[in-house]
Structure formats: structure tokens, C-alpha cells
Image (cartoon, rainbow, N blue to C red):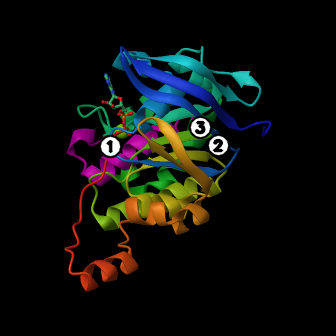
Amino acid sequence: MVGSGLVVRDLSVGYGPVRALRRVSLEVPEAAVVTVLGANGSGKSTLLRAISRTLSFQGGAVTEGEVLLGDRRIDRLPPDRVVAAGVCQVPEGRRVFARMTVADNLRAGALGGARAGRAESLARVRELFPVLAQRAHQRAGLLSGGEQQMLAVARALMAAPRFLLLDEPSLGLAPLMAERIADTVREINDQGTAVLLVEQNAALALRLATHAYVLEVGEVTLQGPAAELAATDEVRRRYLGVVDEDAAADAETTGARTLTRWEG
Ligand SMILES: Nc1ncnc2c1ncn2[C@@H]1O[C@H](COP(=O)(O)OP(=O)(O)OP(=O)(O)O)[C@@H](O)[C@H]1O
Ligand SMILES: [Mg+2]
């Protein structure tokens, strides 16, 4: 085991009778970018919630397994202590406090972190997201979708996490804005923060990550270096939308019709 990484070991999660994760194991080494791919409902958000200890807000609970930060178990801590330990989640759906100003949203994010680092965190966030500095006194609800996503990420960074958990940061954004978010994730990582990135945009995620996991109905079915996974037929077909050209050609010569279908 890597001494200071974030390690999930044999984690199972249920929402009442619904089993959402089954013995999931995964590791995020210090300062790495790791991605989790999977179809809708495969358990990606559940995994992040289990790490950040916010599952109970959704009626879920860990039924077995553990989460470690280095040698320390964090799966018994309350959510604010997980943040204090250096793990911070940006939830799905870019939730910002819409009626509060941008500046107050950032202040709220700093509450979990050490007081001493606050000015430093604010400077970092302003540099990463100049637009947020310009809009400091505007109500967050008036920002564009992409800007709100930036604010959600910025708010999490105010706690100066060593591990940032990102739940679908590119969801619903135009390609150009998704690219900007990707650039920012890379920059955040370059500054030494490890990132656990959940994405449906597999192409984007596999470019950013060094290691990738595929979740299917709550279980890890594939894992490996991101570049290797991106080259497998399974991932190309199911997550990168690459059509199998040989199969398509075969179908054409045999007169069969090629159907595309939604999977997951
Ligand atoms: N609060 C909840 N109560 C009951 N079941 C839930 C709850 N949240 C999620 N689930 C179920 O747990 C499973 C995993 O859901 P989860 O939201 O983790 O998937 P996901 O991979 O994040 O999906 P998406 O890509 O749509 O965000 C699904 O079957 C879902 O219906
Ligand atoms: Mg989700």
C-alpha cells in the first residue's frame, strides 16, 4: 500500500435494501489523478459519498469495508472531520449557495480548512478562476452553469484539500467549457492536489487520469493505467463510443443492419 494515499478497500454500500456498491477497492496515490467511469446508476456518486461520509444524508450506509488515508481510517469520521483530514468533495450538480455572493460561497468553503491557510487558498482560487474574482460580489445563482461549476470547485479548494473528489464536473457543459474545466483539473493537480474524478465524459477523464476504474452495477469490472484502458475494445466501444469497424463491415457484407443502442 502507498503510505499516504487514499485507499478504499472492499467497500459495500446500501441504500436500505438497495445494494449500490459491492466490495469496491480502489487507490488514489498522493498527487495522482484517478478516474472512475461507469454508466448511469453504476455507483460512482455513491463511492464519492462513502469517502466523504455524506452517504447518510441520502439514506445510505457503508455495510462493509474501509476507507484509509495513509494508515488512518477515515470511514468512521463525521463529514467535517474528513474535510479537515484533507479530503473534499465537489458534489454532483454544481451545488452553490445561489442567494449568497461568490465571495460568501468561498468563505463558506474555507470553514472546514485551517484558518491560517485561508488567505493562501483564496489567492490560489483567484488565480485559477479569475472570473470568480471579478464576480466576487455577485449572487452565485446569477453565474453561468460553467461559472457555477468553477465556483463549486473553488469552494472545495478553499479547504486546501490534499484529495479532491469531483463528481461529473463537465456534466451539462458545452465542449469548450468542459475543456476549460479539464485544464483547471490538470492545473489543480500540477499544484500537488490528488484528484478522484468521476465522469461520464470518458474521453476527457482518460486524458487527465493516470489510472482508471470502470464500475458496472456497483462492482469494479476493469482497472488499469488510463492509457491501457482507453485502448481496450470494451472501453472504446462502451465508454468512448468508438464503433467497431470490423464488426460494422461484417454486418454490411452479410446484409445485417447495424443497430446502435444505449447501454447502461
Ligand atoms: N438516495 C438514494 N436512495 C436509494 N437509492 C439510491 C440513492 N442514491 C442512489 N441510489 C441507487 O444507487 C445506485 C447507484 O447510484 P449512483 O447515484 O451512485 O450512480 P451514478 O453512477 O453516480 O449514476 P449517475 O451517472 O446517473 O450520476 C443506483 O441504483 C441508484 O438508484
Ligand atoms: Mg452520479
Query: Looking at the picture, which amino acid does disc 1 mark?
Result: Asn
Q: Mark 3 points at which residue?
A: 160
Residue 37, x across and y down, in percent: 46, 50
Q: How far apart are marks 1 and 3 (CA)?
A: 30 Å
Horizontally, is 248 left or right of 82 in the view? left
* Pointer 3 or 2: first along the chain: 2
Q: Give the SS element for disc 2.
A: strand
Q: Farthest bottom residue?
A: 253
Q: Name the residue under label 2.
A: 28
Magenta span includes 229 = no
Please tell me whether the stretch drawn in magenta is mainly helix, strand or loop: helix
Q: Residues within 10 Å of mark 2 (few under 14, many from 20)?
A: many
Horizontally, is 159 left or right of 170 in the view? right
Q: Give the SS element for disc 1.
A: loop
- Identify the residue at image location x=35%, y=66%: 241
Mark 1 or 2, closer to the camera? 1
- The reply to whether the residue tagged 2 has its Cβ within 8 angstroms of ligand 1 is no
Q: Which of 34 and 107 is in front in this view?
A: 34
Q: Mark 1 points at which residue?
A: 40
Magenta span includes 158 = yes
Q: Quadrant of the N terminus?
A: top right
Residue 62, x across and y down, in percent: 51, 18
- Whether residue 154 is situated above or below residue 134 in the rendered picture: above
Residue 133, x across and y down, in percent: 40, 50
Horizontally, is 60 left or right of 159 in the view? left
Q: Which of 204 and 228 is in front in this view?
A: 228
Q: How crowded is mark 1: few (under 14 residues within 10 Å), some or many (20 or more)?
A: few
Query: Looking at the picture, which amino acid does disc 3 mark?
Result: Ala
Task: Magenta stretch: give its range.
Answer: 136-159
The answer to whether marks 3 and 2 mark residues whose Cβ atoms lie closer than 8 Å is no
Residue 188, x across and y down, in percent: 57, 53
Q: Distance between the residues labelled 1 and 2?
A: 22 Å
